[in-house]
Image (tube, rainbow, N blue to C red):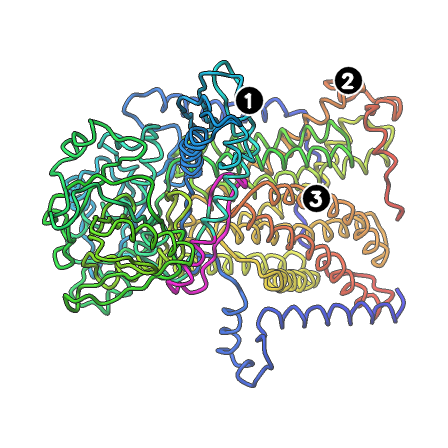
Amino acid sequence: MSNTSLWIRTGLILAITLAGLYLVVGPRRVPTAADFTWEGIKNNLAENINLGLDLKGGSQLVMRVKTEEYLKRLTENNEVAALNAAKEAKDEAGNPLPATDASFVAEPGNYQVRLNVSDTSKNDAIVAAVNKKVDFTNWSQSTSGNSIVWTLPTQAQSRLKDQATEQAFKIIESRINAYGVKEPTLQRQGSSDSGLILLQMPGVDNPERVKTLVGSTSRLELMKIISPPNPSPVQTYPTREAALASIGGKESETRKVLPYVEREDATTQNATTKPPPRFVVVESPAVVDGSELRDAAALQGRGGASEYQITFQFKPAGAQKFGDWTGKNIGNYMAVVLNDEVKSAAYIRSQIFDSGEISGRFTKEQADDLALTLKSGALPAAIEYQEERTVGPSLGADSIRAGVSASIGGLVLVVLFMLVYYRGSGINAIVALVLNMILTMAALVSFGSTLTLPGIAGLILGIGMAVDSNVLIFERIREELRLGLTVPKAIDTGFDLAFITIIDTHITTIISSLILYVTGSGPIRGFAVTLILGLLINLFTAVFVSRTIFNWLLHRNPNMQKLSI
Amino acid sequence: MFDFFHNIHIDWLGRRKIFIFISVAIMLAGLVSTIGRELTPGGTDAFNMGVDFRGGTVVVAKFKGERPSEDQIRTALNQAGVGDPVIQASTDKADEVLIKIPLVENTAAPAADNPEGAVDQVAITQQVQAGRQTVKGALDTFGKEAEGEATLDSAPDATYKIVGTDSVGAVAGSKLRNQAVTATLLGCVGILLFIAFRYDWTYAAGAVIAVFHDVLMVLAFFSIFQWEVNLTVIAAILTIVGFSVNDSIVIFDRVRENLNLHRSKSLFDITNEAINQTLSRTIITAGLVLLSILALVVFGGEVLRSFSLALLVGVTLGTYSTVAIATPIAIWWQDKLGAAKFKDKTAKSPSGQKIASASRRSVTRRPATR
């Protein structure tokens, strides 16, 4: 090999090594003298390498948006709306259209609205009337017997599920940010309609409050209570049955029975001391709901330090609707309904336009969280937790310490063996190995990848294959020497022949790792990424760098008779 | 020069029946273990599944000073209504204890407003909410927990602190497992195609069968010794697959090379020679990797136990299966295609024609160096 090309190779290796070293232990700012002390290097290292939650400590939640619930509610609402639209509409002659009643099917995978008609000849007019008022754009419409059927195609189901999850994702994001979790990670998981969301919170080791906050649906509705108007007290019933009896035994489209918990006492939180709920009958649908909210805030109530209430303001459209309605209902009772529970029942003294309050003796924490969830909007559907992992920082540190010390121990053994078995060439292998580790870490840093336990497994396999590459080359060189080749020829042939094997093993593993990366998630990906990076770098260190070192030896002593191998 | 493994002439392929007998025996033992355990009423399950897959809660609690005995903790948990807790005292730390409880039974009937009767879903949510609380309730009988930000040192009246929890609904775990299985199988298809492209279909088949062999054997060990199967085992199995294929290719590569050098020798002899030639590399690499893994087994701690044990078994078997499974299968199949005499190794094939026709393509690749 010519002198210049040897120098070019050496310069290239040195430049890459320095860049790699800087990426791993250098600061992301102008370096100062402190960065060259042992402490400084350790700090920079900790800052540069992104440790996963399993190593650093923190909480990880996997939640699922109950998208089927969302589709069910959509179907239900469309059914009511379709029937109303069909009944309100008139044909050209001004006669009511012959729609009799409606029903719906809502089970996973199958969502249908069925509108029954007494006379099928007017179907077109009915469909036109319904489509004017109800959003059936994603639905496919058909006729079967005496009914008009709207079905939600599977594709549209997936799309709507995806949308609902995306909406929930945004809401959760704003809640988490407002709550002030440090460096949270929020990601969609699985297929687009799986509804899975992953939340990672480093440093949080008791996620209970966050869980309640994230998961609360906080569906606010203002509804009319069916009750004799003021001054008689609001009409409540001691049991659900009694309430149902007053509306003819069962709930209907326009009448619902809701529990009314009078004045939750903040000082006595225990469930046992809570007064038993009473029940009220309310008019459905709600006058306005949480989607019309512009702002909400927690406010200290009249009762003193431990009593908080929530005030809210409406957006212009909601305020108009609310104003119109309260104007017409002065003297009547209105319920503030939160998640299907009546929080307070107030009588309407005068027309109210843009604001209201929820009183209920909340603690400061409860009121803050509630205001926050109201402001961020209601989740499109409830959330359930599928997985919760918390690693206390000490446990994470323990496992990383154990793993690191064991790996270093193993590496020391490997180094010792290489030195004893391959003598001079062992140094060559060790240089390549150390360089491999530095560059793999540098690659992880520059891709911003997170190092997790499976990632360390990938690292171990990568290092194992790096050692293997060296062994392959050395054994091959020894073999060629035994066959009687001269040292330069043996090194040349050894590298060339071993290279074929190395490239085959590496490509095979890279291919399978790429497939793991594409099809897998989370931990599997972490494994694949570190392994792929380690292998690509190994092609450079074990072959290119190692070869350059041998070339230097030959350069200094072209007629070398004996190689220390 | 240290050199232990050259000039070795072991007839590996001639001993293939012994190897295959050993493999089949271990696999049968694993099969007996899984089926036997599954069928024994009240006995252990086929696999000691961790919460990652079965669903449930693991709590790691650190006590101030001496921890209560395992029996005391078990009694406390039983009183809290947990039927079958697993309590593992940490071997390397005197004050920590690991408590595993299965999915909390949801005894309440499905709520009335849950018409789908989605009991599973309810159970998951309950588990993830309730697991930690249940254990905390039981442990509170020993004293207060240092809650929230407080540490054991900063809270003088606390006796313990929960330093880690894992709650997993059964669905999430099985999803991940299925995903890992699919990903690995697809990975194997990739390996199969690449080896077929670079070498031959028969080699690809041999390598992939060896991969399955290794994974099944590791699973057999996990069933027989009831080591816990958790997420880290998946990472370990991925590593084993990589290692096993790597090993096979090294030998295949040598076979391919030798085929071109000694066209007059039988495939059988060439293969034996290739195995013997690469034996030093095989032993050194496997030995070094095992050395590092042994360090992990001994010093890696409880969290990595399943991972390091799986690697230990897997790497050993991966090396063994290359010689005992991958190569014999590849050569046996080649032989079928080429109709050479497999049993009679002295029967020299007259020329390269005995090499299976399917492998012709690979014969053309030769390094230019010699």
- Cα–Cα gap, marks 1 and 3: 58 Å
Read off the magenta span: A170-196
Say which mark, if any, is on residue B341.
Answer: 2
Q: Residue lying furthest front in this view? A: A93
Q: Residue lying furthest top in this view? A: A145
- Identify the subunit bearing mark 1: A
Q: Residues within 10 Å of mark 2 (few under 14, many from 20)?
A: some
Of residue A489 and residue B243, the one placed in the foreground of this image is B243
Q: Amino acid at mark 3?
A: Thr
Say which mark, if any, is on residue A310.
Answer: none
- Image quarter (top left, top right, bottom left or bottom right) of the N terminus of chain A: bottom right
Residue occupying the point 34% across, 45% down: B167
Say which mark, if any, is on residue A142.
Answer: 1
State the SS at label 2.
Answer: loop
Instruction: Report the mark closest to the observer, 1 or 3.
Output: 1
Q: Is residue B179 left or right of residue A319?
A: right
Answer whether labels 3 and 2 touch (C-beta < 8 Å).
no
Q: Residues within 10 Å of mark 3 (few under 14, many from 20)?
A: many
Q: Amino acid at mark 2?
A: Lys
